[in-house]
Image (cartoon, helix red, strand yellow):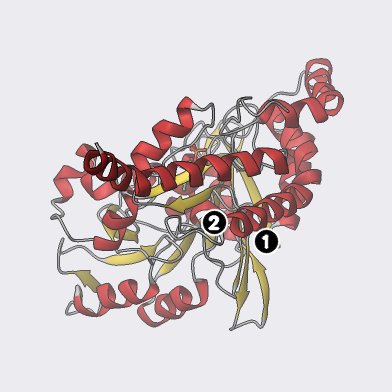
């Protein structure tokens, strides 16, 4: 490979080239059977995905946003209920809360894992909530009942679920996992004394199959996993206009179904997911090793209870913006997930959070940089990414010294 070749941030083309025949067969089958909505292809994928997640049920829906919204509604979120989550996530998490009638409130993240800090959730429940006369937990900030929490398994690493589930039990909260970036991520549960999959720990979990995810469709798609048959049944109704039988509507619902072409594609790819996740973990090890001697780059941390699947490989550096621009100039793609935390987005000005309410989130959002990470990334490409990152970091350190020296010398 030429040292100047482009290293894209994401490379879906190679994945699809490897699976070309199998993927094309899915399209042919859909065209021949003319079954595009529902049917056995969707059901077979749902069964296989539930199995992969160690969950009893998986219900295919139109997107990860649908999955979150339907999960919230099926688990009983009512108009005006507070749903607690983190500000360092994609806006779909909070859009789904609002669209289900809920009110998002935030707690800060853990600076090592970038996920919900259980300690901050505990503080919120203890000091920012009170009990009303009938014993309901009420947010002091909004005066609304608090009954649900959404931990987001960001970048492919689960939140510290035991600690969150302990709090949820104590305060009687529903837990919905936002597993949209965490297909196959594992968590060692001290409660159960075993590794558990993302999507099997809360009351329900939402997955996105947006094309760039670890398991990605060739269009929009998502799924909810749950161990609760009633929740699964409710989501089947919600995704299909509130009907279990055609034209008999128990309630209004949505057009939020997973289509058969996407389900077929996802089923083909699911067979490779464990291998791809293992390859991502290998690449994460290589990055960690290559960055080990450098102090200007902080690499991701894997707590002992976590087996992440590195949907994103996120480093932290003071030089973030200039470094991203420099890498772009050298043909290396990067991303920022996410540059503006949700409490600072215009869309949430009405929530009236104040500067400094979530200091950890603010601190990391200025420094995080996502590097290329995918199963097809070669060790040569990784070496070049690291070389360019470190080269840039060194120049930033030495340039001021060198120019002072040049001034003195001449
Ligand atoms: C954390 C998180 N939640 C929710 C979503 C929404 O998924 P979708 O784009 O499939 O609606 C995404 C997708 O990017 C996400 O990353």
Q: Secondary structure at mark 1?
A: loop
In the picture as drawn, the residue positioned furthest to the front comes out as 410
Q: Residue at x 75, y 23 (%)?
A: 35
Give the image location of residue 132, x and y in percent. 18, 77
129 to the left or right of 366: left
306 to the left or right of 276: left
What residue does disc 2 label? 205
Label 2 Cα neighbours within 10 Å, binned few <14 / some 14-19 / many ≥20 = many
What residue does disc 1 label? 55
Given contact means CB atoms under 8 Å apart, are the residues at marks 2 and 1 in contact?
Answer: yes
Label 1 Cα neighbours within 10 Å, binned few <14 / some 14-19 / many ≥20 = many
Vertical side of 395 occupied by 125: above or below: below
Vertical side of 323 occupied by 5: above or below: above
For residue 13, the mark is none
Tell which of 76 and 249 is nearer to you. 76
Vertical side of 407 occupied by 296: above or below: below
Work out which quarter of the rendered image holds the N terminus and state it: top right
Give the image location of residue 104, x and y in percent. 28, 54
Q: Secondary structure at mark 2?
A: strand
């Amino acid at each position: 490979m030429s040292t100047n070749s482009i290293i894209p941030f994401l490379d879906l083309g190679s994945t699809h080239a490897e699976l070309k025949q199998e993927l094309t067969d899915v399209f042919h089958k859909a065209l021949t059977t003319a079954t595009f909505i529902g049917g056995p292809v969707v059901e077979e994928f749902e069964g296989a995905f539930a199995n992969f997640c160690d969950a009893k049920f998986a219900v295919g829906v139109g997107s990860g946003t649908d999955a979150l919204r339907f999960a919230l509604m099926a688990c009983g979120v009512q108009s005006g209920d507070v749903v607690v989550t983190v500000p360092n996530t994609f806006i779909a998490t909070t859009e789904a809360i609002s669209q289900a009638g809920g009110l998002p409130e935030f707690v800060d993240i853990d600076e090592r894992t970038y996920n919900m800090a259980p300690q901050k959730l505990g503080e919120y429940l203890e000091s920012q909530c009170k009990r009303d006369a009938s014993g309901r937990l009420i947010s002091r900030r909004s005066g609304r009942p608090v009954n649900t929490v959404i931990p987001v398994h960001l970048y492919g690493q689960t939140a510290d679920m035991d600690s969150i589930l302990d709090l949820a039990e104590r305060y009687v909260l529903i837990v919905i996992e936002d597993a949209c970036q965490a297909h196959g991520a594992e968590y060692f549960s001290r409660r159960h004394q075993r590794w558990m999959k993302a999507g099997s720990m809360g009351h329900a979990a939402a997955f996105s199959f947006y094309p760039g995810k670890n398991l990605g469709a060739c269009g929009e798609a998502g799924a909810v996993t749950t161990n609760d048959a009633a929740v699964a049944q409710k989501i089947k109704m919600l995704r299909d206009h509130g009907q279990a039988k055609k034209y008999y509507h128990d309630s209004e619902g949505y057009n939020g179904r997973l289509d058969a072409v996407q389900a077929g594609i996802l089923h083909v790819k699911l067979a490779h997911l464990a291998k791809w996740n293992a390859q991502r973990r290998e690449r994460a090890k290589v990055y960690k090793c290559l960055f080990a001697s450098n102090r200007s780059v902080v690499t991701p941390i894997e707590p002992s209870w976590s087996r992440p699947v590195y949907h994103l490989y996120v480093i932290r550096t003071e030089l973030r913006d200039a470094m991203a621009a420099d890498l772009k100039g050298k043909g290396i793609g990067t991303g920022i997930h996410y540059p503006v935390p949700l409490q600072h987005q215009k869309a949430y000005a009405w929530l009236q959070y104040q500067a400094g309410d979530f200091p950890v989130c603010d601190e990391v959002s200025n420094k995080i940089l996502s590097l290329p990470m995918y199963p097809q990334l070669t060790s040569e490409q990784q070496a070049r990414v690291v070389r360019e990152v470190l080269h840039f970091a060194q120049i930033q350190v030495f340039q001021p010294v060198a120019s002072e020296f040049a001034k003195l010398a001449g």
